[in-house]
Image: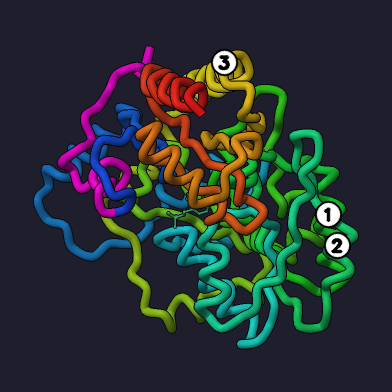
Amino acid sequence: MYKFDEIMERRGTNCSKWDRLKELYGRDDLLPLWVADMDFSVPPAISSALNKRAEHNIYGYTYCGDEYYEAVIGWMGRRHNWDIKKEWIVFTPGVVPALSLAVKAFTKPGDKVIIQSPVYHPFYDVIRNNGRYIMTNPLIYKDGKYTMDYDDLEEKIDSRTKILFLCNPHNPVGRVWTKKELTRLGEICLKNDIIIVSDEIHSDIIYRDYNHTVMANISPKIRENCIVCTAPSKTFNIAGLQVSNIIIPNDKLRNRYEIEFENSRISGPNIFGIEALIAAYNNSEDWLDELLVYLEGNRDYFINFINKRIPKIKTIKPEGTYLMWIDCSELNMNSAQLRDFFVNKCRLALNDGEMFGKEGQIFQRVNIGCPRIILEEALIRIESEVNCL
Ligand SMILES: Cc1ncc(COP(=O)(O)O)c(C=O)c1O
C-alpha cells in the first residue's frame, strides 16, 4: 500500500545525504548510500500531525506531556515486550548526545569505556572528546559472521573500566544479538561493576527470523545496571527532528544522568519532534510492518546480486538495520584506494569501513533504505567497475 518504490527528490532541502556530496566526497554526481536515513516519505500519520501543528503558527517552548510518555510506554510494551514506567524515561534530543552525557555522568576523566569494534564512529568521539579512554573489545569475524569476544573482554577489564557501550542491534555489522549472547555479556558487566549503555536506536528494524532483546529486559539485576537508548528516528525516518528517549530504570543512575543533562544546558524537545513521536508510535505501525518487508526485499536483492554477479565482494547478511556491511578484501585495495574506487569509479557515496575502526579497513557500509531501483543502479555501477579491474 505504501509507495516505497517512489523516488523522492531530496536535493535542495539541505539534506545531508544528497546536498553535501561535493563538500564531503569531492563531487556531486554520486548516488548517496551513506548516512543512516532513508529516502522514503514518512508515514501519513506523521505528516498530517506535523502539518496540523504547523498551522497553529506559534512555536514557543514546549515539554513532553502525558500523551508523549504513554506513546513511548505503549511502543516499548507492544513492540519490545518491555513494561516501562513513565519516570524511567528521560527525553534527550538525540542518542549521540545521550552517549556523551552518560560518559560524563558515569565516569571520571581517565576512566575507560568499552566498545565492540568495528562500531558506529561517534562512540569513539564521545569517549575521546570527554577525556576518557577507549577500550576496544573487537568483535570476532569468522566465516562471514560476527560474534562477541568474551575472553578478550574479561582479560582487558581493569579497575578503571566503568562503562560498556553496546550497539544492539549492531551498526555496522547488522547483528541482532541473541538473548544468550546478551546474558553472557550482561553477567560479565555485573561481575565487574561496569554499567551497560545499550544503544538500541536500530531495534525496530529487525528482519524475519530474528528477535530484538532489550538489554535491560533480561533480568532484574541487569535492568538495574543498564541505560537503554531508544528513538523513533531511524524507524520512521525522522532523524532531523532530534527525538530520543533514554530509559533508565535505576533511580540512582537516572538521577546522575539527569544532573548531567541539566548541567549541560542541552535544549529540551522541539514541538515537531513531540508531535512526530506520538503519531509514529500510536498510528504508524502498519507503515513500519510494510517497510520491514520492503527492506528485507532490498536486503535479499542486494545479497543475491552480489553473490551472482560480483562474487569478489562478500556481503554480511544483516539480521537487522538497513545497513549492509560488505567485505571488499578480494579487491586488494587499501582503505584510501577503496574510497577512490567507489567514489570516482563507481560514483557512489558509501561509508568507508575504516571510520568504524581499524577492523573495518577493507569494508564499506551501504545504506539500503532507498527505492530498489536506486540499489539496482548502484549495484550495476559496482559490477561494471569491478569487471574492469
Ligand atoms: C548506533 C547509532 N546510534 C546513534 C545514532 C544517531 O543518533 P542521533 O541522531 O539520535 O544522535 C545512529 C545513527 O546512525 C546510530 O547508528
Measured as percent of width and height from the top left, residue 134 is found at 66, 72
Disc 3 packing (10 Å; few <14; some 14–19; many ≥20)? some
Rendered position, 168 above or below 220 = above
Query: Is 227 inside the magenta-drawn segment?
Result: no
Quick one: label 1 or label 3, which is nearer the N terminus?
1
Measured as percent of width and height from the top left, residue 85 is found at 60, 55
Label 2 within 8 A of ligand 1 by Cβ: no
Quick one: label 3 or label 2, which is nearer the N terminus?
2
Q: Which residue is mark 3?
A: 309
> What is the residue that sits farthest to the front in this orientation?
389
Residue sitting at x 41%, y 50%: 68
Q: Which residues are magenta?
A: 1-23
In the picture provided, is 233 more to the left or to the right than 128?
Answer: left
Q: Which residue is mark 2?
A: 152
In the picture provided, is 68 more to the left or to the right than 221?
Answer: left
Q: Which residue is mark 1?
A: 149
Mark 2 and mark 1: Cα distance apart in space:
6 Å
Is label 2 in contact with label 1 (beta carbons under 8 Å)?
yes
Mark 1 and mark 3: Cα distance apart in space:
33 Å
Disc 2 packing (10 Å; few <14; some 14–19; many ≥20)? few
Report the magenta stretch's main SS: loop
Rendered position, 75 above or below 182 = above
Q: How is the image coloured?
A: rainbow
Mark 3 and mark 2: Cα distance apart in space:
38 Å
Rendered position, 287 above or below 60 = above
> Amino acid under label 3?
Arg
**Nearer to us: label 3 or label 2:** 3
> Amino acid under label 2?
Asp
